């Protein structure tokens, strides 16, 4: 059965025991993303912090409803991205999106993606790619929003 | 009445193929779209190979043949639902377009019974497919009319008719409701609601996408004013559906899409319109698809929708019993076969519908997971989404057993059983 290659043990672990779950303060932006195909949804908050030359991800917190893939993905992402400078985090996100679009052909880079390489099998199932991307797209959107708001604030100051 | 399912299955070439690395296909997604028998596939090919031409405007032999085939499909569709006259049958691309056609035509009305404005009301139900909610929301936004709805009683999946007197009033212009729910399987008391609507002076539209393919449906017996169904759920091609409406209403209703074929005379300043049904069929229609739909109706007529319904009731009874045996599984809607059709949605404790569907898919069993375009209904029942297995004339009792075993396998895989 191919199921084990899709549902890697890491994915099932994160599904059963999600990391960083629950909405927390403080936060700089909050978004709600929905997968209209299945109704899966995530409300996600991002807090940024100053870390030298550029902002870094201080915290990601979320509340989510959905399948094992979408739940595990947002958990793995939070684990991977919290603490990273925003530009690194964005690059990681791009790498994950590329992996999802690879139709199972890509060799994921574990140095960049960490536990998220476990999702490589998802890219063979077009119907599930959106599940894996839901949390990542929400994070990207929230972070862009937080950065815009940050700039507005800077200009005001 | 028992169907010779083994013989019927031979009519559907796709049922011979394997999926996911050599597993036989167990297709339990016919409420989504049905498979196509050889007769329909051949009818499409034959039309394109032998008779292809535009209709009503090609004065040559092919044009005559194509027109006859297309208009023949209209006559067949009228007979299929007990319509008085084939001019009451409008071809659309699907039922969503059929419902939008009525909604936009009402929005175009400046006077008469179709005109809508503030104070007027459209009534739908909480168990509608999005295609029978959103067009009415949009119509209400355009006209200032108000949308109201029947609620569902709960997990038993019935319409709550206790407030019918307050919902359907002299302000109601139209009641739009589903004949058979695509999620719950519930067959609604359309006639009873239609009588209440007519007594209040309102029109009634029935979404029959899930009933016409599976049981005999008669527009006069239902007592409705409009009824829509779609070809691809009844062994026909995609891209063709039917909107039936009472002729006097179609005469009065303004057109929706303007263009070729729907006119009587065109001047630069204004136009007059063709009589129904052509008034509502602008542009070149899906001709081959209408011919394919006619072949599908021939096929279903030959087997008989009574016999198909009886077969599905047998599958349904077996499926409801097998699913009831599974710990942690809850069925959305009626749990006995009476008053329901053979689409069964369910929830499995601890396993998300997408994951149930994934395990089943791996076993070659095709079902649908999600909200099935009925988000408000799922919200009303307090579930985010569900898994749906739906049966048709080509399904077998063995496939029901495969479904039940597959669900148990999903429970084992996700360690909830």
Image (cartoon, coloured by chain):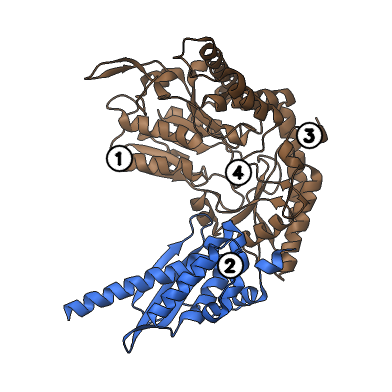
Question: In the rendering, at what x and y percent does residue B269 appear?
Answer: 21, 20
Residue annotated with mark 2: A106
Residue annotated with mark 3: B10
In this view, the residue in front, B257 or B128, is: B257
Q: Residue B142 carries which label?
A: 1
Q: In this view, does B253 lie to the left or right of B376?
A: left
Question: In the rendering, at what x and y percent does residue A11 appear?
Answer: 62, 73
Question: In the rendering, at what x and y percent does residue A91 appear?
Answer: 44, 75
Helix, strand or loop at label 2? It is loop
Quarter-of-image position of residue B208: top right
Q: How far apart are marks 4 and 1 (CA)?
A: 31 Å
Q: How crowded is mark 1: few (under 14 residues within 10 Å), some or many (20 or more)?
A: few
Q: Which chain is blue?
A: A
Q: Do the residues labelled 3 and 4 touch (CB within 8 Å)?
A: no
Q: Distance between the residues labelled 1 and 2?
A: 49 Å
Q: Which mark is residue B32?
A: 4
Disc with the residue nearer the chain's start (1 vs 3): 3
Front: mark 1 or 2: 2
Q: Which image quadrant: the C terminus of chain A?
A: bottom left
């Amino acid at each position: 059965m191919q199921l084990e290659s899709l549902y890697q043990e890491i994915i099932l672990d994160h599904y059963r025991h999600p990391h960083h779950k629950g909405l927390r303060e403080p936060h700089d932006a909050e978004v709600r993303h929905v997968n209209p195909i299945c109704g899966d949804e995530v409300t996600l908050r991002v807090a940024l912090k100053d870390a030298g030359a550029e902002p870094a991800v201080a915290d990601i917190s979320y509340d989510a409803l959905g399948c094992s893939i979408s739940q595990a993905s947002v958990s793995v992402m939070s684990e991977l991205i919290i603490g990273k400078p925003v530009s690194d985090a964005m690059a990681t996100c791009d790498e994950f999106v590329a992996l999802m679009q690879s139709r199972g052909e890509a060799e994921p880079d574990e140095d960049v993606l960490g536990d998220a390489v476990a999702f490589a099998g998802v890219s063979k199932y077009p119907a599930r790619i959106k599940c894996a991307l839901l949390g990542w797209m929400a994070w990207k959107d929230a972070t862009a929003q937080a950065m815009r708001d940050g700039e507005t604030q800077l200009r005001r100051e | 009445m028992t169907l010779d399912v083994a013989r019927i299955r031979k009519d559907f070439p796709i049922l011979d193929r394997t999926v996911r690395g050599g597993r036989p296909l167990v297709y339990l997604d016919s409420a989504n779209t049905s498979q196509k028998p050889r007769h329909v596939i051949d009818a499409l090919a034959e039309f394109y190979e032998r008779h292809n031409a535009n209709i009503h405007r090609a004065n040559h032999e092919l044009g005559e043949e194509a027109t006859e085939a297309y208009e023949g499909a209209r006559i067949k569709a009228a007979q299929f639902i007990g319509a008085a006259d084939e001019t009451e049958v409008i071809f659309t691309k699907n039922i969503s377009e059929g419902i939008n056609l009525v909604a936009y035509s009402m929005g175009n009305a400046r006077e008469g019974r179709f005109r809508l404005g503030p104070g007027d009301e459209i009534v739908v139900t909480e168990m509608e497919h999005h295609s029978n909610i959103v067009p009415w929301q949009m119509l209400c936004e355009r006209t200032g009319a108000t949308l109201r709805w029947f609620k569902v009683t709960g997990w038993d999946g019935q319409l709550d008719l206790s407030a019918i007197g307050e919902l359907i009033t002299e302000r109601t212009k139209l009641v739009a409701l589903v004949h058979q729910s695509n999620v719950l399987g519930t067959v609604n008391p359309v006639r009873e609601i239609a009588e209440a609507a007519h007594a209040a002076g309102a029109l009634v539209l029935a979404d029959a996408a899930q009933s016409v393919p599976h049981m005999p449906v008669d527009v006069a017996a239902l007592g409705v004013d409009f009824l829509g169904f779609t070809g691809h759920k009844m062994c026909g091609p995609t891209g063709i559906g039917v909107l039936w409406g009472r002729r006097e209403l179609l005469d009065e209703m303004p057109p929706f899409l303007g263009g070729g074929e729907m006119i009587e005379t065109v001047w630069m300043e204004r136009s007059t319109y063709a009589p129904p049904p052509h008034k509502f069929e602008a542009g070149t229609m899906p001709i081959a698809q209408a011919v394919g739909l006619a072949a599908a109706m021939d096929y279903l007529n030959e087997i008989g929708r009574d016999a198909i319904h009886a077969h599905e009731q047998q599958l349904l009874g077996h499926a409801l019993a097998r699913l009831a045996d599974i710990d942690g599984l809850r069925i959305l809607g009626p749990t006995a076969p009476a008053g329901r059709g053979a689409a069964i949605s369910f929830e499995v404790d601890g396993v998300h519908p997408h994951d149930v569907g994934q395990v089943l898919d791996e076993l070659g069993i095709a079902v649908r997971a999600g909200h099935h375009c009925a988000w408000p209904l799922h919200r009303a029942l307090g579930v985010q989404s569900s898994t749906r297995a739906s049966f048709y004339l080509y399904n077998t009792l063995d496939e029901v057993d495969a479904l039940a075993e597959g669900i148990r396998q999903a429970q084992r895989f996700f360690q909830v059983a």
